[in-house]
Amino acid sequence: MKRLILCVVLPLAPIGVTPARAQLAEAWTHWKYFRSIDVVPANEPRLVRVTLPIEIYGMAQPSLADLRVIREDGAEVPFVLHARVGKEERQWRPAEIADLGFTPSEHTQIVIDVGSDHDAHNALEIQTGVNEFFSWVDVAASDDAEDWRILNEKAPIYRYEDTREGNTVVSYPDTQARWLRVRVLQPERRFAVYGCRVAYELVEKPELVGLPGRLQPDPANEPKESRWEVDLGVENVPGAAVRFEAVQPEFHRTVRVHARAGDTDWEEVGRGDIYRYPNPQSDGAEPEIRTSLQVRFAEARARHWRVSVINRNDAPIEVLAPTLEGSPRHVVFRQETGATYRLVYGNQRIAAPEYDLARLTPKEELEAALPFGVGSEVANVGYLSPEPWSERHPALLWLALAVAVAVLGLLALRALR
């Protein structure tokens, strides 16, 4: 009699797929997670970089101090954690108003003496006590207060009394000219000015990319405010800007950005203005469209974000779509021939490393490093918590203390008897 034998064939995992759990070398038992770094073989040493996925921010330390690059054999590899977060600096110095006048139906003119030190400047602040205004200004420069050259034509300055938001700083190309001529194009009345100051403004643009997760309209919007919120699903994600898309041809609104980490309250982390409007004085030519649709702010880290656009008494802007942006972090290291690498993280008790590579590698070389990706997250099955035993088992510690107190009490009672 023949027997029928059933064979069940289980599908095998594809070759090269990292299992969900694996073990790191013994030196890395205090790191919870790792990812493979997917570099292609190199014929000679070279700088390579990988961009951190957003999920790592929630698993590593908030400062990313526990990031390490290791080889397959567990050897530590020097690296640089690189990010282009941008920078804005203004070094203000006083300037003297040499002449102030008003031409009816045209403008208020301010002639400013910057000083004879010939230091470069590229920004001017107009100091005024007016609480509610919107005006255009022309800025010209001269070396002798006679021959003038235009530096910035039709720049907006404004202030809103109800929100106390505004901007009275005008930027222009670098110049060492001693004299500035500012015309406030407010023809109906004299514009009140009580002072001015100038600065050299240093601006380094950041690298910004859209963060995953779409800002959704808040159904509880107030009549004078449009609001969006997003839960990125990961804590400690760095955000530094909000970029808007809009189809409406003309608008000018104040923007406020709030962030919230965990169960904390909302905290304002940034504010600014967005606008789009044609230049009203274009001498009969096609109007120039002045547009600013991005609000940048000092980098903040959070999971929950809220963006508010203050409409005042205007209707909400048509088809307005905000996107939260942040500066990505890049891990840069020197790839050797024949080596494979891993990125490890998830140790809350370790300090940030210090390598010579960070001091010896120019920023241009870091940014020119060849880009590669990382694999999926893998849990280290050999993980041991770096916390002391007493912190990992507080209940047992208190129980032992209670037992010790009880024993001492019994011994004291016996001694009294």
Image (cartoon, rainbow, N blue to C red):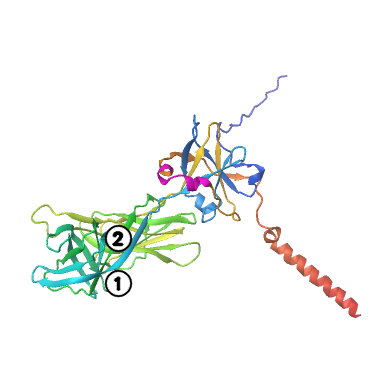
Q: Position of residue 173 (x, y in %)?
A: 24, 55
Q: Which numbered disc flags the more N-terminal residue, 1 or 2?
A: 1
Asked if 87 appears above or below 41 in the picture, the reply is below
- The stretch of residues the image draws in magenta is 356-365
Q: Which element carries disc 2, helix, strand or loop? A: strand
Lateral position of residue 262 relative to residue 86, left or right: right
Q: Position of residue 266 (x, y in %)?
A: 43, 66
Which residue has dot 2 on it? 200
- Extreme residue in the front direction: 117
Asked if 269 appears above or below 83 in the picture, the reply is below
Q: Quadrant of the C terminus?
A: bottom right
Q: Amino acid at mark 2?
A: Tyr
Where residue 160 sits, quadrant-wise, is bottom left
Q: Which element carries disc 1, helix, strand or loop? A: loop
Q: Quadrant of the N terminus?
A: top right
Viewer-side residue, 328 vs 7: 328
Which residue has dot 1 on it? 164
Lateral position of residue 127 relative to residue 297, left or right: left
Number of the label disc, if any, that sits on residue 387: none
In the image, what residue occupies the spot 34% across and 65% down?
Answer: 221
Q: Position of residue 333 (x, y in %)?
A: 50, 41
Q: Amino acid at mark 1?
A: Arg
- Extreme residue in the top direction: 1
Asked if 5 appears above or below 153 in the picture, the reply is above
